[in-house]
Image (cartoon, rainbow, N blue to C red):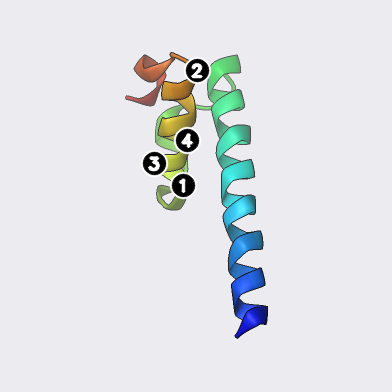
Amino acid sequence: MITWFIIKILLRKDVYSMAIIYATLIVKGKKEFADVPARIKEQVKQVLIDLDLAELAE
């Protein structure tokens, strides 16, 4: 049970890291929001909102 909990925490961190990477690529113009995998779209959108770049998440 504790192993599952640790794995879940690590995977959550990976998703957040990937969201930051995708947001960075969107800001630099290398990717578009439509290119973001559905699994992490909400996290990427939140990162862009936090950067006051919500218009890029459309």
Q: Amino acid at mark 1?
A: Ile
- From mark 1 to mark 4, how far is it between C-alphas? 6 Å
- Residue 22: quarter of image: top right
Could you tell me residue 1's position as x and y percent? 60, 86
The residue pinned by badge 1 equals 40
Using the image as rendered, state which of residue 58 and residue 14 is in the foreground: 14
Determine contact: label 3, label 4, CB under 8 Å: yes
Name the secondary structure under disc 4: helix
- From mark 2 to mark 4, how far is it between C-alphas? 11 Å
Residue farthest to the front, as pictured = 2
Determine contact: label 1, label 3, CB under 8 Å: yes
* Among numbered discs 2 and 4, the one appearing first in the sequence: 4
Is the residue 13 above or below the residue 33 in the image?
below
The residue pinned by badge 2 equals 51
- From mark 1 to mark 3, how far is it between C-alphas? 6 Å
Using the image as rendered, state which of residue 40 and residue 34 is in the foreground: 40
Determine contact: label 3, label 2, CB under 8 Å: no
The residue pinned by badge 3 equals 42
The residue pinned by badge 4 equals 44
Q: Residue at x 66, y 61 (%)?
A: 10
* Among numbered discs 3 and 2, the one appearing first in the sequence: 3
Q: Residue at x 61, y 25 (%)?
A: 24
- From mark 1 to mark 2, how far is it between C-alphas? 17 Å
Determine contact: label 1, label 4, CB under 8 Å: yes
* Number of residues whose C-alpha sits closer than 10 Å to that of mark 1, classed few (under 14), some (14–19) or many (20 or more): some
Name the secondary structure under disc 1: helix
